[in-house]
Image (tube, rainbow, N blue to C red):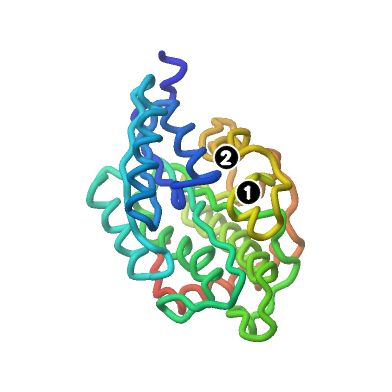
């Protein structure tokens, strides 16, 4: 029992945890004794996921709690952060920004942002800012090996020549840029909190089916996200990008400090996020 409850007492918020890799990660965390905060945008699916995560943690003391908010709204992102802070005033162990969408057509969010960018980039940026003082150890942002190799700041909202693959690739590059800038700011502030990003693997999720077809591994084998947020050898590693649970290089442009800072400023303006670092 002790071996399977190694995360006992720890609390993890996993966004987009009602299916796919997020759901698998949530169940795996609970099976190790953690309390998992399960986020999704559908009440019914969150309730179902909470039941499944609770069942996965039954032998090790793991638990689950559900939160319903739609990341197409920045107000909903702020509400999620407020609810988590209220329910866990002592803070949470880690934040896993896993939620994401793949939009086949150009759509705008409640706040006027291109939907892929809104959910995949603006939402985790704002949520992380709102929870920064509450997260105790790790922030993990889910990027992708499909991340773009360039960024057009004049077309971030994809209003010229919309492409589903292009919008998704841009969003994942933005997540890497955000992660690196956050890690640098945390380091400069002397914070022990780490920020890393990863490609979670080519996994047969609904998103993969929508964009590329069933070309990946089983969801049950997708453990890279879990490893990134729990591996004790990563306790002091920050500002890193992982593929296959191995630290590797991300697109060359992602290391450009000027690009990182420019995107950070754009996201602050879009979201109204305020950072306590």
Q: Can you give x and y, in whole percent of width and height, for residue 253 in the image? A: 73, 66
Look at the numbered discs 2 and 1 and tell me whether their residues touch, using CB distance below 8 Å. yes
* Nearer to us in this view, 28 or 150: 28
**Residue at 44%, 51% in the rendered image:** 15
Determine which of the numbered discs, if any, sits on residue 228 in the image.
Answer: 2
Rounded to the nearest angstrom, the CA distance separating label 2 from label 1 is 8 Å
Q: Nearer the viewer, residue 142 or 52?
A: 52
Res. 265 in view: no
Q: Is residue 204 visible?
A: yes
Query: What residue did someone put label 1 on?
Result: 198
**Which quadrant: the N terminus?**
top left
Q: Residues within 10 Å of mark 1 (few under 14, many from 20)?
A: many
Residue 127: % across, % down:
41, 60
**Which of the 4 image quarters holds residue 76?**
bottom left
The picture places residue 271, in percent across and down from the top left corner, at: 43, 74
How many numbered tags mark residues here?
2
């Amino acid at each position: 029992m002790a071996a399977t409850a190694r995360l006992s007492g720890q609390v993890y918020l996993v966004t987009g945890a009602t299916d796919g890799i997020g759901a698998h990660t949530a169940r795996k965390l609970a099976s190790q004794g953690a309390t998992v905060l399960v986020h999704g945008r559908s009440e019914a699916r969150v309730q179902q996921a909470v039941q499944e995560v609770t069942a996965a943690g039954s032998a090790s003391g793991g638990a689950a709690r559900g939160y319903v908010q739609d990341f197409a709204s920045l107000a909903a992102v702020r509400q999620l952060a407020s609810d988590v802070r209220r329910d866990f005033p002592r803070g949470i162990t880690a934040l896993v920004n896993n939620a994401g969408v793949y939009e086949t057509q150009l759509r705008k969010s409640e706040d006027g942002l291109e939907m892929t960018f809104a959910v995949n980039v603006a939402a985790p940026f704002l949520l992380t800012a709102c929870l920064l003082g509450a997260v105790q150890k790790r922030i993990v942002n889910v990027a992708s090996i499909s991340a773009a190799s360039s960024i057009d700041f004049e077309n971030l909202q994809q209003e010229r020549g919309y492409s589903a693959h292009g919008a998704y690739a841009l969003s994942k590059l933005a997540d890497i840029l955000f992660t690196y800038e956050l890690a640098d700011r945390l380091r400069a502030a002397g914070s022990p909190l780490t920020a890393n990003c990863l490609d979670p693997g080519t996994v047969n999720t609904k998103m993969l089916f929508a964009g590329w077809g069933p070309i990946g591994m089983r969801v049950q084998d997708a453990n890279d996200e879990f490893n990134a947020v729990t591996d004790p050898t990563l306790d002091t590693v920050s500002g890193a990008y992982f593929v296959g649970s191995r630290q590797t290089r991300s697109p060359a442009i992602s290391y450009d400090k000027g690009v990182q800072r420019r995107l950070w400023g754009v996201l602050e303006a879009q979201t109204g996020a305020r950072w306590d670092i």
